[in-house]
Amino acid sequence: MIDDGALDGLSDEELVKRPFDELVAALQTTVQRLEGGSVGLEESIELYQRGLRLHTACDARLRDAELKITELGRRGVPGAEAEAATPTEE
Amino acid sequence: MGSPDQPSIWDQPAPAGDQPAPAGDEPAPARPAPRILRVTDLNRRVRSLLDSDAILADVWVEGEVSQPSFPPSGHCFFTLKDANSQLRAALFREELTRAGMRPTHGMNVIIHGRVRAYEPQGVYQLYVDTITAAGAGDLHARYEALRVELAAAGLFEESRKRQIPRWPRRIGVVTSPVGAVWRDITNVLKRRYPLVELILSPTVVQGATAAPAIVRALKRLYAQPDLDTIILARGGGSLEDLWGFNDEQVVRAVADAPVPIIVGVGHESDVTLADFAADLRAPTPSAAAELATPDATQLQTVLGRMRDRASAALLGRASEQRRRVDAERRALTGLAPDIGAARQRTSDLLERGLRAVDHRLGEGRMEVAAAQATLRTLSPVATLDRGYAVARTADGRILRDATTVASGDSLQVIVARGTVETRVERTRADGTEDLLR
């Protein structure tokens, strides 16, 4: 979880590299606090700006995401290739 | 076609027939025309080949009875199979009666017989002379027995099921890297949640080696750090095809998963013991991928909604502030009329007071004037103005009776303006009435 201080200390580039779920969670918390009603106008504006940054970061992550695939046992695990090469399945 | 007992010309050995080719020292004759067999002849040849095999003529075989039929002839025909292969079998009436049992579908049996070709259909089959049930060893019974045993061991308990992480970062997948399943899973995730990292632990998923291979692939994945979820998947198939997923070691390995595991095997209707041991059962491999991830296409909407909520909250906060300010202004302006009214009231009172005072003053002035007038009327000066005079004796008495003075007495006669010093010449008692003339 990213706390407020850490969040505000991050540049936009750094923010985008944070795990996606952290960004979503931080956005959620920010919105909830904004909606909570116990914050003043000044803090509301700060929270809103923070929410916008997080939203932009989430958006960028979604837009640029590419599925990353790692295959185990390609090398070093005897038999993996043989197993992998078995052609029939269905 | 003649009777099989009457040799046809085709039964005669061909001129160079079965003999080894002559040594190559002679010049090769013209290439002989290809020998063309009738179907019957070919089948007969296969039959004699099979008949000449000592093992096939006297064989014991174990397998599962599949779809036995009992035509009116009284014989019984069925398919004998195991996980990988199948064989046609014929059990004639006499042997059937002797066996003292009827083969049923799914029954595991041990058979003695011989394998021969059945020429009319060009198939080979097992001619059964002895058949015995192999006890509760058939796949269904084994499945059921293992299910009961593992359930008793608590592997399928609902309380063991863990929540599938909603926002996985790394998902491990155990499946065959070739074929539709792996492709389906990656396609679903590319479309749905490309933010995730997939770790594929490849394995065979079919055949006799499947079970230990699946266990190895799972264990390989269990050694990976930071996995959030594991998917174990394979495509649909027969009970035999899916048998690896009913293997006790596989089921136990699934139950031992260090992180939540989703099993998606076969189609909707295929339920394996591995499914029961999983934290979540998916009807298909694609469904497993869907159940493992949030939908990024919906995420856009969800995120957009959050941003909207933030805007709405901020606007709400701003207008709330404005409302508060307005309310306070209203409260202030609400107070102002009160002051005015009070001022009004005060000034009214004041005015009324002043008016009352004025009035009183006016009255007072009039009273004073009246009093002055009265006073003036009563004053001897006013009387003197009217022509009266006041006579005072020398000792200062006001002379009211003429007899109280005598001739020669000095008198002061005070008139409106001035005093006359005089002496009495004579007095008379009468004369007052002259004033009225």
Image (cartoon, coloured by chain):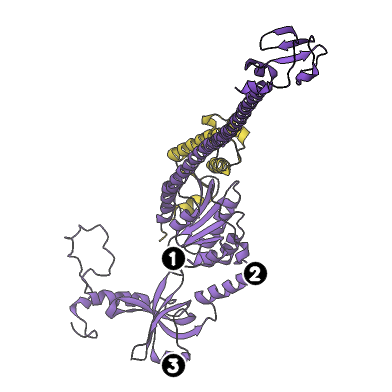
Q: Are marks 3 and 2 on the same chain?
A: yes
Q: Which mark is residue B16?
A: none
Quarter of image, res B67: bottom left
* Label 3 residue SS: helix
Q: Which residue is mark 1?
A: B268
In three-dimensional space, the C-alpha distance between marks 1 and 3, rounded to whole angstroms, equals 41 Å
Please tell me which residue is depicted at 50% across the width and 84% down the height of the picture.
B132
In three-dimensional space, the C-alpha distance between marks 3 and 2, rounded to whole angstroms, equals 43 Å
Q: Which one of the lettered chains is coloured purple?
A: B
Query: Which chain is home to disc 2?
Result: B
State the residue in front, B269 or A84: B269
In three-dimensional space, the C-alpha distance between marks 2 and 1, rounded to whole angstroms, equals 26 Å
Above or below for B212 versus B321: below
CB contact under 8 Å: marks 2 and 1: no
* Label 1 residue SS: loop
Residue type indicated by callout 3: Thr
Residue type indicated by callout 1: Glu
Residue type indicated by callout 2: Ala
Q: Nearer the viewer, mark 3 or mark 2?
A: 2
Q: Which residue is mark 2?
A: B153
State the residue in front, B385 or B399: B399
Q: Which residue is mark 3?
A: B97
Above or below for B77 versus B370: below
Q: x, y percentage for residue A69?
A: 48, 44
Quarter of image, res B96: bottom left
* Label 2 residue SS: loop
Q: Given the current orientation, which residue lies at the most extreme right position?
A: B395
